Amino acid sequence: MDLTHPELRGVVDLDVDGPTISRHLYGHFAEHLGRCVYDGFWVGEDSPVANTAGLRDDVVAALRAIDIPNLRWPGGCFADEYHWRDGVGPREQRPTMVNSHWGDVVEDNSFGTHEFLQLCELLGAEPYVAGNVGSGTVFEMSEWVEYLTRAGDAPMSRLRTANGRSEPWRVKYFGVGNEPWGCGGRMSAQQYAGLATQYATYCRDHGDNELYRIAAGPHRDDYAWTETLMKTVAELGGRRLLHPAPWQAVSFHYYTLGGSPDKQGSATRFSTDDYHRTMVDAWRIEEIVAGHSRVMDAYDPDAEIGLVCDEWGTWWKVEDGTNPGFLFQQNALRDALVAGVHFDVFHANARRLVMANIAQTVNVLQAMVLTDGPDLVLTPTYHVFAMNAGHQDAVSHPVQVTADGGRHESGAGAYRTITTSVSSRDGAALVSLTNLDVDRPATVTLQLRGRRWSPGAATLLTAPTPQAHNTVEDPAAVAPVPFDGARQVGEALVVELPPHSFATVRLDLGD
Ligand code: AHR
């Protein structure tokens, strides 16, 4: 293999099904943080920005276009200081509070439970509500679940009806706290496991609404935390998994921080070495998902308990002149490539990994869209979500790599530069391909066996440099374009990828 021209070869059996890629791996996260909820989603009914009941029409339309499957809310760290009763009832009577985690600003609670659920309805997304363990009570959490999901004549359904909504909502995903090892209460794993069991017990299934309770898991590679949670379920069940378990999934968070020698550099002003450090850090998601999965496999070989990565993405220095507590950052082609790596890892681990939520959807960290007054900019990361939408609920077809000459090695670290994944759904397959190499093109050759296929539309996302990004003035500096670099050679799909690029190829499938 000519190492001056990076190349990856692999075999894919289109007639052999791997795990289904849950659409929830393309999930989202919106916190009361900076301009995510306020300004990002919520502008209020009287805003000159076009809105439906106070919710921005342009943001809703952009997210509907990428088939947003779920939205996690209200945090993050904010979840553990949020008291849901403050956010229901007439807006002018809602109490205010200090958002001590994020900018120390006063929160007026104008966006609360009803506004969030209405947003989910407009988006066509499932709500994922994160409850307060850090500073809330078991009773408060239990009543919130009742308020959200109980029909008929009961205290919380009466209150909901008085607040303008008689029908309960369907809420499946419910988080039991957030980062309890840090902002969510500085607890030990043992301490949290006990509390989570207690809180989750009182999150009842009302009527036919079945909750999927998600225990707050570790940071990065704290496998001992995951082990404590799994052991708790096993011990409750007398060394077998307890049925029903107090929670149905365990989450973890992983951020890509490696943008400069001091970790978090600028989103757009970075060196080539910074780029390499970022990619080394991005690839760590692979070992971290594998590590948590290994621990879970030991207690739960049938993968009854899901793994959820409910915060992931790049975390850079805030843009100059913005509030450091608002975490507002630009989003460059580099971020899109980080997303390409994450999705391939998520697809490969879809048996155990049931949900992932990018942090965060609008105006915070690795956002899909950035708003500026009435303007909206789609980020390069948005385009990866759009181009990959066909993987949602598709069957994965693992790529057996037979030769991989795509590798970078320098003082910044070593990483694989070519990654790909394949899935199929509704008579079509989708191939995603990422070339992280900054300077060199790459060739990917996949032997696609087991079914007849012919190449369909292909799309490319790249730009002259990895620093390229979109602004109000130049909204399409990084935008998908039709791609002519994919061809069929016998049984093989051969794709010539430009440097620092992401591409997708659709295949029409026969028998
Ligand atoms: O996404 C920003 C913050 O990062 C979240 O509030 C917290 O859970 C994590 O530390």
Image: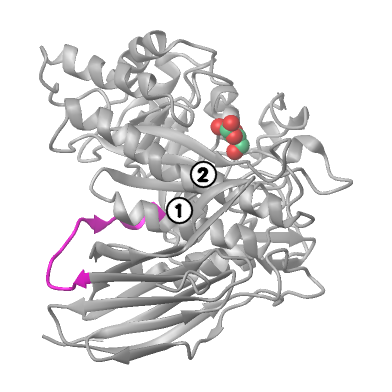
Binning the other alpha carbons within 10 Å of mark 2 as few (below 14), some (14 to 19) or many (20 upward) gives many
Name the spot of residue 451 as percent of width and height, x first.
14, 82
* Placement of 241 over or under 5, stated as above or below: above
Label 1 CB, ligand 1: below 8 Å?
Answer: no
Q: Amino acid at mark 2?
A: Trp
Which of these two is toward me, 279 or 220?
Answer: 279
* Residue picked out by circle 2: 312
Determine the secondary structure under disc 1: helix
* Residue picked out by circle 1: 342
Mark 2 vs mark 1: in front? 1
**Residue segment shown in magenta:** 12-27
Q: Is residue 22 magenta?
A: yes
- Callout 2–callout 1 Cβ contact below 8 Å: yes
The structure residue drawn at horizontal position 25% and vertical position 15%, both measured from the top left corner, is: 232
Name the spot of residue 90 as percent of width and height, x first.
62, 38
Q: Amino acid at mark 1?
A: His
Which of these two is toward me, 496 or 232?
Answer: 496
Q: Quadrant of the C terminus?
A: bottom left
Of label 2 and label 1, which has the lower sequence position? Answer: 2
Give the quadrant of residue 336.
Answer: bottom right
Left or right relative to 256: residue 388: left
